[in-house]
Structures are given as C-alpha cells and as structure tokens.
Image: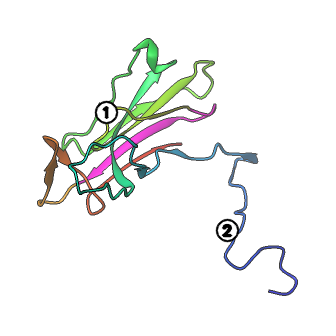
Amino acid sequence: MAGSAHAPDAPRPRPARCAAGRAAAADFACPPFVDVEPRPGLRVPEGWRPCPQPERHWLRGASLFDGDPAGLAQLRDDTDRGGRRAWWDLDPRSPQTWHLVCLYEGLESGLTAPLPAGLRRCTRETWREAARGARHGRVVIGPDDRVRVVCR
C-alpha cells in the first residue's frame, strides 16, 4: 500500500472513545480462551511417544476480589433471575484496587489482573445451548457456548 503507514495485515489503530469531552476508560475483558502447552515428563508405554499439542480451554466464569485474590476477599455478584447474567458495580472514584480472576474449563487455576481505575461495572454473560458436554466431571462450555466477562 503506497503512502500507508501500516502493513496490509497489521491492525489499524482505533480512535479513542470520548464521553463528555474526556477519554472514557477502555473496556477490560477476560480472554475468551487460553492455550496450554503440554508439559514434558509424560510417561508413555514402551514403543509409544508423546504427540504434544496445545490444549484450548474456554472461559467459563470469573470472580472479582477486593484487593489481591490471595487475601480471599471475593466480592458477591448480583445475578439476574435466569442466572445467565451477573455483575459487580464498582465506584470509579474509589482508591480500592479490584482484581478480576478469569476461570477456564478444565483448569484449576485461572488468570488474574488488577482492574484499571475508572471502571464502573463488570458483567459476566453466559449463553448456553441445550447440547452440553462434560469433561473431568465438569460441564464444558466450549466454542459454541459462550461466556463473556467485560468491565467498563
């Protein structure tokens, strides 16, 4: 592309969102999935060898903590009647640092990050279809069934 400052396949910068003449806080969201690389040390029978492939684990929920999750101060969410939507209301003026923990199917641990200042609400939405499966004794929410966690 002649005269362009961007490579053809590079993402283009988006204009900043504004509200009432000031920049709004950007959305903060859990990644929809994580890929886990296999660990070395798998014991296999003689004559066999491991065939390592990354495993994709889909987002299945989230928790919000008042401070570091190690302090175990988990906040209770508000939930709609159907249980498909839950939210936490935040005071954007509060000096408190909230930590979001994103939980993934098939994993015992999740991802955590402190929320940026100025956010007002975190929402967890779940869309489930009639056909669900189970893995390791848990209901699996996969690529056809979505969970989205966004803080704004």
- Relative horizontal placement of residue 96, taking residue 33 as reference (left or right): right
For the residue pair 111 and 123, the one nearer the viewer reads as 111
SS state under label 2 = loop
Residue 16 pos. (x, y %): 72, 56
Magenta stretch: includes residue 110: no
The span picked out in magenta is 115-127
- Relative horizontal placement of residue 60, taking residue 32 as reference (left or right): left
Q: Which residue is mark 1?
A: 108
Count of number-bearing discs: 2
Quarter where residue 70 is shown: top left
Q: Are marks 1 and 2 in contact (CB under 8 Å)?
A: no
**Number of the label disc, if any, that sits on residue 137:** none
Magenta stretch: includes residue 117: yes
**Residue at 52 percent of width and 25 percent of height:** 98
Question: Closer to the camera: disc 1 or disc 2?
Answer: 1
Residue 38 pos. (x, y %): 38, 48
- Relative horizontal placement of residue 11, taking residue 146 as reference (left or right): right
SS state under label 1 = loop
Q: What amino acid is at disc 2?
A: Pro
**Residue at 53 percent of width and 35 percent of height:** 120
Q: Is residue 69 above or below residue 115?
A: above
Residue 146 pos. (x, y %): 31, 56
**Residue at 36 percent of width and 40 percent of height:** 41
Residue farthest along the bottom direction in this orientation: 2
Q: Is residue 42 above or below residue 79?
A: below
Label 2 CA crowd tier, 10 Å (few <14, some 14–19, many 20+):
few
Q: Which residue is mark 2?
A: 11
